[in-house]
Image (spheres, helix red, strand yellow):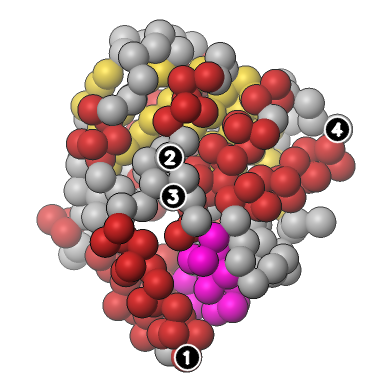
Amino acid sequence: MLNFERKGNGKETLVLLHGFMENLSIWNDMEPHLSENFSLLKIDLPGHGQSEMLAEVQTMELMAEEVKKVLDDQNLTKVHLLGHSMGGYVSLGFAEKYPEHLKSLTLFFSTYLPDDAEKKEQRKKSYRIIQDAFAHYARAGIPNLFNPNERDILEGKIEIALETALSTNNLGALASVKGMVERTDKKQVLENLDAKILVIAGKHDNAVKTELLIKNLPDKTNIKSYILDCGHNGHWEKPAICAAIINTELLHNLPKHLVF
């Protein structure tokens, strides 16, 4: 069973899935801003935080199955599911396998698009350094995930992100990268899903092709998107704004495409 924490007693359950080289602590800044109507279920994905690695290649579908086991253990049949980056990929895997269990799906600085050939090659080249020089890999990559125009302001958050990354099991990280390489196009999942779909993206996100992501979203009334003036880590860069959007969209309704 994956490690998890439950917070709050709200009527609506919001399941939070962190990204690559993260753990359930990444939601700490957003948590005070999330509505008291939410009961939060924060999960450590396999090979991250206090959850054990499952396999040498941890596909997004494999991780989604483990998330489902946590929901079953907690007797949760219908939830709001939000995933950051890799957590978004896992959320899409969950939505494909268990759509009937979703009230909403939020892609939080994540994408339904697969890696292109260049990105796949980049990931494959990282295998050895993740295995043999993980600290160097984390220190080189983490700062680039934040808005480059606000590096000085975000210095403390970058340090927290780096500490979180360095606490990750390097073999768990490696297994997850291998799983991400195998990702396929999940646009069809969004097209088929009847639940509310929320997309929160960053204007300066170096990990997600935001413009392409928004441009190719299915034209459906149940999908809303927001573009924020930040990098890949809205939970650290714009926690109050991100929480406000989540509160409003998952509990109420707003106009379709907004830019902050």
- Residue 184 horizontal/vertical position (percent): 46, 45
> Would you say the magenta stretch is mainly helix, strand or loop?
helix
The residue carrying pointer 4 sits among few (fewer than 14), some (14 to 19) or many (20 or more) residues within 10 Å by Cα, namely few
Q: CA distance from mark 1 to mark 2?
A: 31 Å
For the residues bearing labels 4 and 1, Cβ distance under 8 angstroms? no
Mark 4 → mark 1, Cα distance in angstroms: 41 Å
- The residue labelled by disc 1 is 132
Query: Mark 3 or mark 1, which has the lower sequence index?
Result: 3
Mark 3 touching mark 4, by CB under 8 A? no
The residue tagged 2 is 185
Q: Earlier in the sequence, mark 4 or mark 1?
A: 4
Q: Nearer the viewer, residue 174 or 33?
A: 174
Q: Position of residue 140 (x, y in %)?
A: 30, 77
Q: Residue furthest left?
A: 149
Picture residue at 69% right of the left edge, 30% below the top: 98
Query: Residue 75, which numbered label?
Result: 4
Query: Which of pointers 4 and 1 indicates the residue nearer the eye?
Result: 1
